[in-house]
Image: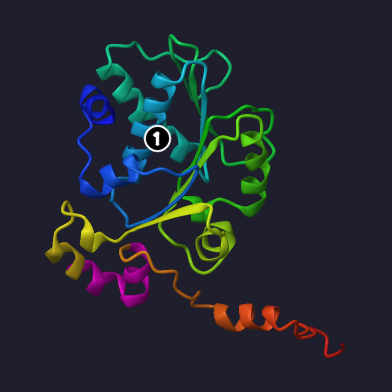
Amino acid sequence: MAGEFWGRIGFKPDARQRELLAGAGRRVILNCSRQWGKSTVAAARAVERAVTRAGSLVLVLGPSGRQSGELLKKAEGFVRRLGLRPRGDGLNEMSLQFPNGSRIVGLPGSERTVRGFSAVDLLVVDEASRVSDDLYRAVRPMLAVKDGDLWLMSTPHGKRGFFHTEWEYGGKEWRRVRAPATECARIKPAFLEEERRVQGDRSFRQEYMCEFTEAEDGVFRWDEIAGAVDRGEEPLATDGHR
């Protein structure tokens, strides 16, 4: 049935994308290469959820309103292929209202302006490694009433923030999917070799190989910090005193 729906909206997922969409999991972390198609996959999932579950609420969050808006545009294109005329919900600047009462709403990247939603069926956090921890904490309670699904999608951005923490230490409830550029048929090996030369090894491993690399300006490595915390060691004093 799902395959038929993707055909109806004109979406042709590749093998890895089909695997992601077919797999179960209320909590999904997609750690993927640039240009892998994560926004397109998430837009397809959002439209599928809105169409098949009447009255559902799907929220799309990014580090800024622009990122959320780009995903909403992809969703709007899928809606048009269903023969529906896209329209807003009359309440939110970035939104899609469906005849069955479902909505997809794009949120701005500000903790002060996202509060007020509840009973969320699906929350998609795009470019999650660039979203602040405060914003992540502000939106998670919106899933409580319906025990909604949560998707975190991003390339890594160093060993920092909730995206890295959930990937490394989030527990068994998370379904983790890693999708490096070398496994994407749409990205040519010759382009990747060029990018490795231009970007440098560290940036290439992060942007295309989905590795959580150390920050270049860091004094200590992440594993050293985590080890000190695990052992209960006191942090170094900044003023020369304990």
The x and y percentages for residue 226 are 62, 77
The reply to whether residue 71 is visible in this rendering is yes
> Which residue is at 29% across, 61% downward?
180
Q: Is residue 241 left or right of residue 198?
A: right
Q: Nearer the viewer, residue 146 or 130?
A: 146
Task: Determine whether the residue tagged by mark 1 lies in a helix, strand or loop.
Answer: helix
Q: Is residue 222 left or right of residue 72?
A: right
The x and y percentages for residue 193 are 18, 70
Q: Nearer the viewer, residue 68 or 119?
A: 119
Q: Nearer the viewer, residue 204 or 38?
A: 38
Residue type of the residue flagged with mark 1: Leu
Q: Which residues are magenta?
A: 194-207
The x and y percentages for residue 82 are 28, 16
> Which residue is at 38% across, 67% downward?
206
Q: Is residue 54 above or below residue 129?
A: above
Q: Nearer the viewer, residue 176 or 156?
A: 176
Q: Quadrant of residue 162?
A: bottom right
Residue receiving disc 1 = 71
Q: Is residue 140 left or right of residue 35?
A: right
Q: Quadrant of the N terminus?
A: top left
The x and y percentages for residue 179 are 31, 57
Label 1 packing within 10 angstroms: few (<14), some (14-19), many (20+): many
> Which residue is at 45% across, 11% downward?
100
Magenta highlight: main SS = helix
Instruction: Give yes or no for residue 209 being in the magenta stretch.
Output: no
